[in-house]
Image (tube, rainbow, N blue to C red):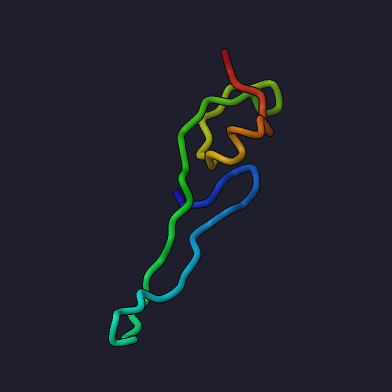
Amino acid sequence: MARVCEICGKGKQVGHNVSHANNKTKREWLPNLQTVRILKDGAVKTARICTKCIKKGDFQKAV
């Protein structure tokens, strides 16, 4: 399963670690994904959703 939010599509970002001597090495930032049970099309489904979407309430939680 990819590290992508199923609601907004947020995924990893890439960049550099920069040392004091200005040496650059590749690194990546991963989104804060949580597994949540949601209602989608009338069925209960587990989805990996980022915390920003959880705070906004862009989905309906399953009871």
Q: Residue sitting at 37 percent across and 70 percent down?
A: 27
- Side of 5 relative to 35 (left or right): right
Position of 31 relative to 54 (above/below): below
Is 9 left or right of 19, judged from the image as shown? right
Residue 12 drawn above or below residue 51: below
Q: Is residue 14 left or right of residue 63?
A: left
Q: Is residue 55 left or right of residue 41?
A: left
Q: Quadrant of residue 43?
A: top right
Image coordinates of residue 48 in percent, x first then y, are 50, 39
The image quarter in which residue 40 lies: top right
In the rendering, at what x and y percent does residue 30 appear? 44, 56
Residue at position x 29%, y 81% in the image:
20
Q: Residue at x 65, y 47 (%)?
A: 8
Indicate the quadrant where residue 55 lies: top right
Residue 59's x, y, as percent?
67, 30
Relative to 10, does residue 49 appear above or below in the rendering?
A: above
Residue sticking out furthest to the top: 63
Q: Quadrant of the C terminus?
A: top right
Is residue 57 positioned above or below 22 on the image? above
Total marks in image: 0
Report the residue that reaches farthest toward the front.
Answer: 20
